[in-house]
Image (spheres, rainbow, N blue to C red):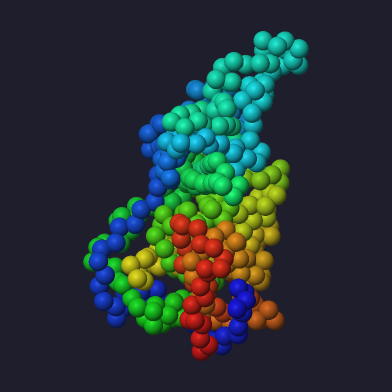
Amino acid sequence: MSIIVRAILIGPWAISALLFLSACASAPSYHPDMPMPEGDWKARAQSQQAEGIEVTAAVPSAKEAKELFGMPLYKKGIQPVWLRISNSRDTRVSFLPVGLDPQYFTPLEVANTELKDKDVDDPTKVVDEFFLQQGLGALSVEPGETRSGFIFSKLDEGTKAFNVDIVGASDNEGIREFDTFTFFIPVPGLNIDHYKVDWRNLYSDDVWVDVEADRLIEIIENMTCCVTDKKGKGSGDPLNLVVIGRPTDIYTAFIRAGWDETETVTRTSTLKTIGSFLSGGEYRYSPVSGLYVFDRPQDVAFQKARENIHERNHLRLWMSRATFEGEPVFMGQISRDIGVRFTSKTITTHKIDPDVDETREYLLENLVYSQALEKFAYVGGVGEVSYENPKGNLTGDPWFSDGYRLVLWVTSEPVAIDDLKFVEWRRPY
């Protein structure tokens, strides 16, 4: 069956979000989690093992990198990643740095970023022994050997996601062993929105409700169509997503698919937003305005920036009080920015592509190709809105839709496209 499924729905729906609490059996208390960067860079190190190989990785923050290397590497778009590779096999293995970053910098390339023109002919300055020593050195790791050092990658603030690819010896048929270790390491420095959410106390233990499929479909179909403003008034962008998964699964899935986290509104993020707005430059972590569901702004937002701040896809998620098969259910909204303008309250607001279904389908395909999706389904709830008679969001931008909500079961573990499942939840009114 085609990944893209569209249909026509009849009739708007606007039932209170409190339906998440009604006619459902109580569920065991659920305590969400979301990784937060704590301690120095060594304390944030993560380790993984597989068939005689252990890989440990850590990522210094901007401040820590400057202290380590004596220069502001982050300002130069360079981010050091520390690796320790231990080989307990009886054959040699090799690390492939291109798997971590196809555009990685060499140690001497980094050392020479501050070299003045007059110094380029001085070998003692061009060949910096300190940076050579900080690098990983030889890429091969002999049996029983442990090798450690830094790989200098392009800058990814917030959560650093990367692969460590290890290739081993050939077998009798000439086939080489190949292992990939995937890391998601939060790095201090940005005021990411979901770090501010008290996930464990978002709801009290006695209000969680676990529902079966028929009841969840009913709840989703009867959920209010759209977001509101802070006062619970107005009808804004449509709630066209339902995401099922723990916060850590969501966080991992979206970052694997190339989405960036968003900063909260601070003086620093304000200045960066203004600078990007005026220059037309890219600000991957730009704050998004607060839209409201369950009487609160979004719990977490992600965005996929394009060439500049004016063009990006972004989505917002709100954790509901419902769980399905033990996994939390999030309501969500996604749209595509085709312009940005300033506001007095939220710094910027977005001008959206009116065809909100297109962006919904883009997300589906994006997660599928990133192997971050286990299952998907469609359920009604938004209500059909024709392009001849569109609705307007809270800032007056028009939108139209076939009325469906896309239900996504995200996963931290990669799922091959061939293993993706379509769940037959779609049913017209």
Q: How many marks?
A: 0
Residue 425 % position (x, y): 48, 81
Q: Is residue 63 above or below residue 285?
A: above
Residue 277 % position (x, y): 67, 47
Task: Using the rendered image of the protein, determine whether residue 72 is visible from the camera's viewpoint.
Answer: no
Residue 198 % position (x, y): 34, 52
Along the viewing direction, whichever of 276 and 186 lies nearer the viewer: 186
In the picture, the quarter occupied by the N terminus is bottom right
Look at 55% across and 32% down and name the residue there: 140
Left or right, 405 with reference to 54: right
Look at 71% across and 46% down and name the residue there: 280
Which quadrant holds residue 54?
Answer: top left
Residue 143 % position (x, y): 47, 32
Along the viewing direction, whichever of 227 and 36 lies nearer the viewer: 36
Left or right, 251 with reference to 369: left
Along the viewing direction, whichever of 267 and 366 lies nearer the viewer: 366
Task: Using the rendered image of the protein, determine whether residue 93 is visible from the camera's viewpoint.
Answer: yes
Look at 31% across and 55% down and name the residue there: 200
Which quadrant holds residue 312?
Answer: bottom right
Q: Is residue 248 above or below residue 381?
A: above
Look at 63% across and 62% down and name the residue there: 336
Q: Is residue 245 above or below residue 166?
A: below
Q: Is residue 221 above or below residue 229?
A: below
